[in-house]
Image (cartoon, rainbow, N blue to C red):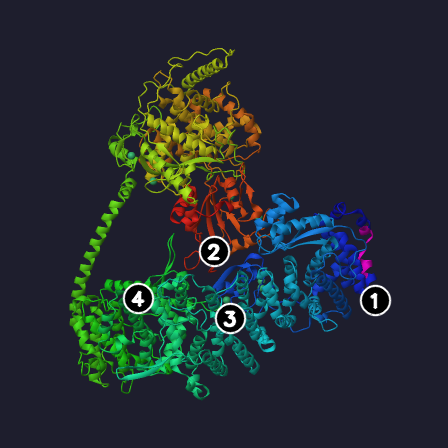
Amino acid sequence: MAAAESDREVPSALCSEFLNFSAKDTASRWLQVSDLPREVYQHLACYVPQIYCQGPNLNPQSEELLTQLLLQSPLEWYLCGEEPSTGLAKLEQINQPSQLCGHVFKVGEPTYSCRECAADPTCVLCMQCFLGSVHKEHRYRMTTSGGGGFCDCGDTEAWKEGPYCQKHEPNISDSSQEDPLAHLTPDMIARTYNVFSIVLKYAVDMLTWEKEDELPQGLEPPERADTYYCMLFNDEVHTYEQVIYTLQKAVNCTQKEAVSFATTVDRDGRKSVRYGDFQFCEQAKSIIVRNTSRQSKPLRVQVMHSSVVAHQCFALKALGWMGHVIRHSDALRRVLCQVGLQRGPDGEGSLVDTLMLCDSKMWKGARNVYHQLLMSSLLMDLKYKKLFAIQFAKNYRRLQTDFMEDDHERLVSITSLSVQLFTVPTMARMLITEENLMTTIIRTFVDHLRHRDLQGRFQFERYTAQQAFKFRRVQSLIGDLKYVLISRPTEWSDKLREKFLEGLDAFLELLKCMQGMDPVVRQVGQHIEMEPEWEAAFTLQMKLTHIISMIQEWCSSDERVLIEAYKKCLTILTHCHSGFTDGEQPITLSMCGHSVDTIRYCVSQEKVSIHLPVSRLLAGLHVLLSKSEVAYRFPEQLPLSELSPPMLIEHPLRCLVLCAQVHAGMWRRNGFSLVNQIYYYHNVKCRVEMFDKDLIMLQAGASMMDANHFLMIMLSRFELFHIFSSIDGRKRYSRENANKDVVQQNNTLIEEMLHLIIMVVGERFVAGIGQVHVCEEIKREIIHQLCIRPMAHSELVKALPENENKETGMERVIDSVASFKKPGVTGRGLYELRPACAKQFNLYFHHFSRADQSKAEEAQRKLKRQQGEDTALPPPVLPQFCALFGSLVKLLQCDVLLSILHTVLQWSLETSGGHWSESMLQRVLHLIGMALLEEHQQLENSEEEATFSFTLKISRPGEAPSNSASILALLETLQNAPHLEVHKDTIRWILKTVASIKTMRERTATTPVADHAGQGQEETVRDKDKAERKRKAEMARLRREKIMAQMSEMQRHFINENKELFQQTSLDELEASASTSVEHSPTSADAALVCVGPRRTRVCERKQVVTCILCQEEQEIRPDGRAMVLAAFVQRSTVMSKNRQRPPPDPEKYDPIFMHPDLSIGTHTGSCGHIMHSHCWQRYFEAVQAKEQRRQQRLRVHTSYDVENGEFLCPLCECLSNTVIPLLPLKKTSSSCDPPTLGPWLKTIGQQVRSLHSAHRKAKATSAECLDSEPDCPAPQGFRLDHTPTSPYSDSIKEMLTTFGTATYKVGLKVHPNEQDPRVAILCWGSCAYTIQSIERLLVDEEKPLFGSLPCRQDDCLSSLVRFGSACWTAGCLSTVQTHFIRLLAALVPDPQVNGSPCILDVDMFHLLVSLVLSHSSVHCLDDSGVTVDVGQLHFLHLVTMAHVVQILLTSVPVEMTMEQESGGAEREEEEAVCRLYNSLRTHLGSALCEVSSGWHLWRCVKAGILPYLRATAIFFHHLNGVTPPPELHVVGPGQWEALCGYLSLPCNLLQLFYSHQDLMEPLLQGWCSHPAVKQCLQGSGTLVSFPRESNQLIELPEDYSALINQASSFTCPRSGVDKSRAPTLCLVCGAMLCSQSYCCQTELDGEKEEVGACTAHTFSCGAGVGIFLRVRESQVLFLAGKTKGCFYAPPYLDDYGETDQGLRRGNPLHLCRERYRKIQKLWRQHSITEEIGHAQEANQTLVGIDWQHL
Ligand SMILES: [Zn+2]
Ligand SMILES: [Zn+2]
Ligand SMILES: [Zn+2]
Ligand SMILES: [Zn+2]
Ligand SMILES: [Zn+2]
Ligand SMILES: [Zn+2]
Ligand SMILES: [Zn+2]
């Protein structure tokens, strides 16, 4: 059937051929011929151009079909030798399915990796495999694929454990070694071989074909037509906009077509934009070229003959076809692999080689198709994967060079396949040994960075844009190198050693080009003119960081390699600094009786570089020598004697001094580039192979030198030698340099130097330096981070270095040092340091920044204070050094250091002068403490005599001639110095330790040693006293400061002070406190509280006084007083909508008088509850407007609010508002003596209405000058038609009535403001009803009582809204409001003079009630008969309630009655009555209503259905009439129904309403039921709303976030139909998935030119302008309001650490947090989304600048 249909569309010539064509015959003919390739080519030459490219528009369906029948089918027949479907099925049976999953990832599809078992982070599983694997119970990582790449399930090398999922588990009879071809007949193999080699050759020929007008030999078409395509190609230079604009000009297409062209070009890499004769196409080409060549190179366009395009199309199809065929059989796949990799007859490259080498010339679509085929063939066959890898490695340099010239993303380049090949460990090692891959990659990389300086170092300074682009691309080579090195060999062969070391040579050459690059010279006098380029060098360093670490790890796994590598590295380093003394004068330094030779070099004057990768690699290897003990076992093989320690430390020391000088402010004139470099030098991303290694190099050097010499060189490099070298150096120095800056600088330098000494001696947590386990290092990092403050998991991860697998190793140790605290509804989970770990805190931890250090110090001191401990922070006890570094401890007691310590202590005696600093002293004390601990430890541990004698040395006074006091004596003096109060605790601790060490020494080894901490009991008591006094003094000071701060705060924000006051007291409370009479007088049974009707509880008159937040004046609320207003926000809402399909009404024609029960769109009014004078507000708003105008002139930025639209922020709480509601007093009430019952009253009303009808007609007639034929209707008694009521309100209140009415009208209808429009009042009543209904729902959903649980601001808002509603008629035209009333009444009581009343099923009864009550005043004001409004209110309530009961019975009784009838007994009366009513309805409607005999059931439906209405009604009358609700309604519990009915003056048996007015009701019922729409509705046209309406909820979300990602990944753009959406976004209100942030799905909003994104468009159709979305790829909630407002919000998904992952960067598994989702839902139901956006935008100005409408 399908065939018959499609042949209508193909040319008839082909049609007849097609009918006669037999694939079987063709195939058998082919079996006979001798030159098969020629035959097949002829066949293709004939058919391909006839099938493809028959016009401007392709016809994929007929093409597909004809391709199958005419082209593929004969090939399949030939291949199988029988009916293809049978043949392929047979093949499938003997197929050995691959154990590799090989699923190729789509863009955005979720991928999973196991942090515990994956060999490297590139090993991933598809969702299906993951769910069937063991890893789902492990610690896994989830990411979304960028497209390409495939599932590694089944690859044993990719997983340390669990390589197979359940599906890919190999059979027990494993035959993977077996040759798949063994099951095929030789004949079959030969035929397959023939077909594949011809087709693949054909495809390769065509895809790499470059001529536009010619075809390869044998493919020339029988006849040539003058038909061409103008083909446009993709590039990465031109933007979407440029292409779209150009196309519109060049080929005369619409914007839409141009967008579609551009989208296809972007996706497929090319697209024909014009079809026709050569001339026609050439013309388009020249326009495109001309238009795009201005800024850059032009867009690539080719005019191609249609037959060429046709063959290229089929070539792609053919590749796909082969991919499809080999899916049936591993044997066929093997044949295809063979064909692809076979070398040509003359030894030329294989077909796959040809494809690879032409890769960069092909268009995107072609590349994708053949990459796909490679992945499903070569990469799925383990034997050929290896062969392919070898070819790939052989071509590596060429491919990379091509890629460098190409401008496409790497994803569509053949080079991106490296990840599939190189990450297989055996393959990588094979390629290193066989193809020397490591060397190839590094050499290729170095070759592409040609710019060098005179010394051969890289120079990025003068890069052009082109070179910078290339630099970015060349970085992918480092990625390849990382893949190759990522798994370390467990066994080494000699060949591997050889090739690795060869690779290392190349790598060292690379590092050599970096050693010393980007040198800086200190700028003096003038600031630098241009910030020098520094980023490129750091990018390179960062990219190489992991490589350098990995190379060290490779080296550490083999002793011979390590020794060789060490030698090579040393040679290169020596070479780098050959003759580092050249040109630099040698000098001799002498101090404390020691002297050393060094060079004269000043960091502050000469060139210095931060890049020293060779030195640092050597430092790393040096540690490995110690860690692996190679240094002790084979010292003879190491060049240790060749080492020159001063040479080793020279450059790292210079670099560290540079940092110190920058801190000291000496390099200010060198600009930010240097500051940035220093920052990254210490940053967690770089420090492992920068700062850390420099420190290690100093440790290594110092351990090989005399300690005194080392320190003297250090002093010299810090340019401090002269200060410490002689006793009076400092004095002399300070006299010469009175300059304060210089003194300050030197102080900082001394601090930095002391810190460096602390680090050199104290940093022992690297295995190989200190005797520690590997995990100690990470433990210590974590401890020190947590010493600053408790941290979230992600914060910790960020602060710790990651290895090449992006792991920090934190999980292994975190539980031993920290405890986890779960998050609440906001915030995140935090790790807290275990108290026991606090004693390991080191104030001078080398990775602390100065800020970290002071924060940590403060936190730790506070902690100690809280625990009532001494606040001293002594150095922690350290592990022992390894032997190679053992001599470092000598630094602590060498003469030079002692001299330095002595000098600083001496300075500290001076109370003033500023020649020393507290930090300096603190560091000196720390060093002394370290030395004491060292001595203490030695005494404790060593069996033999301790060599450390620090205590002795510090007790010795200075030698003659100075005879200065000993260090110990100085300390004792300092202990009592009043200016050193802060350090007293530390000094005391030191003296105590000294004492304890002395005791230890005295007792000698025989007596057990007492713990030094446990000594001095009596002392501690005194200390405690003192500490307590100090603490109290401190507290008092803090309190004083706090009070001072509060006072100034108060002066500045006087208004803010009143905020609390206003939030605490509301109007209601003010009223309540005044109306004590009602509230507190005991209520007897008959004095029950009633809020409506003549029996209404009277409310005492009371004065309401409020305060204006702007002028602080008090004001009484009176009708004739100055107007007071509430800031309010009016918005359209669909929160309660039961029908999101209903199209939005046309604002101009829409008649809003009746609300449909589906509540599809309403107007909500909210308020923050803040009160102002109307004139104060007006002045404020004018000021906002003026400010906005000025600001717009200056800079065109948006605010979070739209002033032109009347928006402003509440001056007190900054809540978004767009109007104000006037506050009105309660109406005065008079009692009516003898209220008429419903019947007579309706009669009177009817008369009044009739007289109004005629009066209105008359008014019209006089104005239209024509006569009326209808008879006059006289007015009833006491009804004064000619009466003109006077408004009781003052002018300012009147003005505000208009203001708010107009605002509600404008927003509610989305029209321009027009205070004359008759619909203004209707909108106000509607908003009143809608707001009450939504609050009623909210209270139900939150399970809160009807009264007493609302925040004051909502109560105030409702009161003023309702009272405004009852007064708004005074601001409009009286007869208009009367007309509304007449129409409203006619919906219930038929009125022959009103047409088009709706049926009662189409009316929301609560809206009707509110409108009736509020509009009635316009008629009642003419009534002088003494009947009060109360009477009307009660009768309206009864009437509407009855209508609602009927409505419920008609709509909400379920058809099927499976429930057994349960007779309640207690409500027998109600049940019988409701049955009677239901049956009488059935008599009116007949079969439209199903039969129900259970009264109990009916009554239950009525009660449940009407409850929301009654509750809303109670809220309404409460606010209208101000009667306090009965206590039962202040709680949730039983008795609600009775309390509610009583309060509303309704009988508990609502059916009584019907039977007490039976004669009246019968005709009404008949009237309601006979409305033609009722039957239609019941028979199912249109949606029938049933009661109670359930509250809307946000959609259900899955528990596991990956389910959402998976759902989104298969979502295609609804416009283009095939494309994967780039930003799939889920509407949380209705569940629609949208294609956001994309050209394809932009639409125009009604009546507006500007195109908006899918989310914004959906926002208007689904949420009346408010939208709540989940951006699935980003894991981010998006709030939108209107076109310009939006913000991002935390998603309701958390990882196990209680954190969200916005942007899905961390990849921890995410699970739904229901509390957080409920919170979002609450925001929505409360109508607070817009407000939330406003607050977010106020807090974060960058949100304001985002083009939300494009999302
Ligand atoms: Zn899989
Ligand atoms: Zn699997
Ligand atoms: Zn695992
Ligand atoms: Zn005021
Ligand atoms: Zn406010
Ligand atoms: Zn929606
Ligand atoms: Zn789209």
Secondary structure under tag 4 reads helix
The alpha-carbon separation of the residues under discs 4 and 3 comes to 54 Å
Tell me if 883 is positioned left or right of 9 in this view: left
Residue 1159 location, x and y as percent?
Answer: 48, 35
Would the CB of label 2 be found within 8 Å of ligand 7?
no
Q: Say few, some or many: other residues with alpha carbon within 10 Å of mark 4 (under 14 / 14 to 19 / 20 or more).
A: few
> Which dot marks residue 835?
4
Q: Is residue 24 magenta?
A: yes
Secondary structure under tag 1 reads loop
**Mark 4 or 3, which is nearer the eye?**
3
Q: Earlier in the sequence, mark 4 or mark 3?
A: 3
The one nearer the camera, 1751 or 195, is: 1751
Q: Amino acid at mark 1?
A: Ser
Secondary structure under tag 3 reads loop
> Which dot marks residue 34?
1
Q: Amino acid at mark 2?
A: Gly
Provide the residue designation for mark 2.
1703
Q: Earlier in the sequence, mark 1 or mark 2?
A: 1
Would the CB of label 1 be found within 8 Å of ligand 1?
no
The residue lying at 60 percent from left, 67 percent from top is 401
The alpha-carbon separation of the residues under discs 1 and 3 comes to 61 Å
Q: Pointer 4 and pointer 3: residues touching (CB < 8 Å)?
A: no
